[in-house]
Amino acid sequence: MSPDEGIGHKQELCISIIIFFISYFSIRFLLHHLLLSPKHHNSKKLPPGPKGWPILGSLPLLGNMPHVTLTNLAQQKYGPIMFLKMGTCDTVVASTPQAAKAFLKTLDLNFSNRPTIAGSTHLGYNSQDMVFASYGPKWKLLRRLTNHHMLGNKALEEWSSVRQKEVKQMVKEINKNGISNEEVRISEFLSCAITNMVSQVVLSRRIFEKEGSGSKEFKDMVVEFMVISGVNIGDFVPSVSWMDLQGTDTSGSIIEWALTEMLRNPTILQKAQKEIDQLIGKERLLLESDLPNLPYLQAICKETYRLHPSTPLSVPRVASQACEVDGYYIPKDTRLNVNIWAIGRDPNVWDNPLEFNPERFISGKSAKVSPNGIDFELIPFGGGRRVCVGYRMAMVVIEHVLGTLVHSFDWKLPDGVKEINMDEAFGITLQKAEPLATLVSPRLSSHVYA
Ligand code: HEM
């Protein structure tokens, strides 16, 4: 190589390096300021939040337990109102009672619609059902009819005997397992009984004659519905909406978590049994009409809603108009997720938040807190005008079934099992990763199980 050729090569190399650095920093600048940074929107101040990746935004950050990741991000870095790019969608997450109240009470009307998501398209008859229907005359009519015929106070009372029959049938079936010393997988009995209660109200017939494989498939379908109603990657990145990226383990419910907590804390179980024994003795099953006289049972249910809410990120809403919350700008069409799980574990609200302690709802500052959407520190059913329409029925069924199970049976772990796995399953509904399996023995007079 001649000296001239050597100098030429060096110049080419220098120019290539300069071009590389200019391109690198230009692309970084563009991605950072135009695509990724959620800090400003047309010079208005957005709530703080993670920057995320091109196209997918913050989705890769969410991991297997989005409610847990979002709680950590809020508590450790970004605060109660957090803004994220989820794929191509602007999303705001409310993680404290005050933040939830700002959206679900103060700005309730502006957030009274739900976004169009996979659940609404595939299982909600193209957003024609009540969960996803646009806020307007049709939704109002559906809510009125549902309250009148199925889920309002009067209708609830009219269907009471149907629910109690199902509970009796369930007790009978569980007792058969108890007598033969077989393990009881409670989630399957619960799924069968509760599905039958709802199907008789909605379809005028029972779906399952007895607990079995059919109930498991139906439960899987319901769980899938809950999963795709919550956070589905395809909802945020339309090009992958045909993929079902969250499968989830199924089964589980508030009642299963409550029983699990009581098995880990036998004094709570015994106290609940004593309360019911003192009220009704051992010669009959618990009735729904007994529930108002069982404050400790009610406190156990509230404590379970707090620590193990079934829809940890609620059902999403969407901003109909741009608005302002706490000095932050929220653009039109921003999705809202209320992190119900984070609110239930907020250390600024709850003393020893990770401890299962029903007493906190008996006396002290939380004694009067109700889960019906009024007190924003405990909102398992959401709040505002789109609060869960089934909350009254859910609360009655949960208290009645749980009370009946602890009154009717003694519960113990199978021989050799020392600890219960408390892991949550991968997914957006709060299922137990490992279904509760126990041994039961009857504790009432034998004629009660006949
Ligand atoms: C433990 C049981 C339940 C929990 C934790 C629960 C939770 C929720 C939550 C968090 C929402 C969203 C509320 C919001 O946007 O603020 C919701 C909505 C809804 N829930 Fe429930 N729910 C339960 C049981 C039920 C039952 C038993 C039914 C009916 C039989 C029901 C029917 C609905 C409907 C139709 C909506 C949509 C309401 C609307 O958009 O107007 N839920 N539920």
Image (spheres, grey):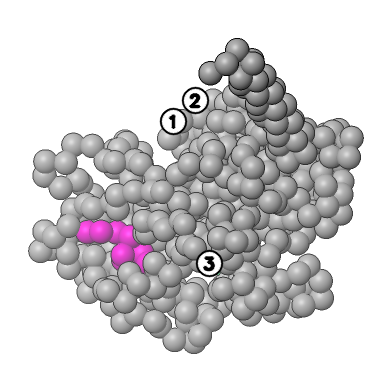
Above or below, 183 against 133 in this view is above
Kindly identify the amino acid type of the residue bearing the numbered disc 3: Trp
Tell me which corner region of the image, top left, top right, bottom left or bottom right, holds residue 111: bottom right
Q: Is mark 1 within 8 Å of ligand 1?
A: no
* Residue at image point 71% right, 71% down: 133
The image shows residue 18 at horizontal and vertical percentages of 69, 22
Q: Main secondary structure of the magenta part?
A: helix
The image shows residue 116 at horizontal and vertical percentages of 68, 65
Assess whether residue 179 is covered by the magenta stretch: no
Q: Secondary structure at mark 2?
A: loop
Report which residue position mark 1 lands on.
Answer: 355
Query: Residue 352's mark?
Result: 2
The image shows residue 339 at horizontal and vertical percentages of 61, 43
| Span shown in magenta | 184-192
- Pointers 2 and 1 in contact (C-beta within 8 Å): yes
| Residue 407 visible to an observer of this rendering | no
Kindly identify the amino acid type of the residue bearing the numbered disc 2: Asn
Q: Is residue 319 left or right of residue 298?
A: right
First in sequence, mark 1 or 3: give its number. 3
Q: Is mark 2 within 8 Å of ligand 1?
A: no
Query: Residue 242's mark?
Result: 3
For ligand 1, give the image quadrant.
bottom right
Quadrant holding the C terminus: bottom left
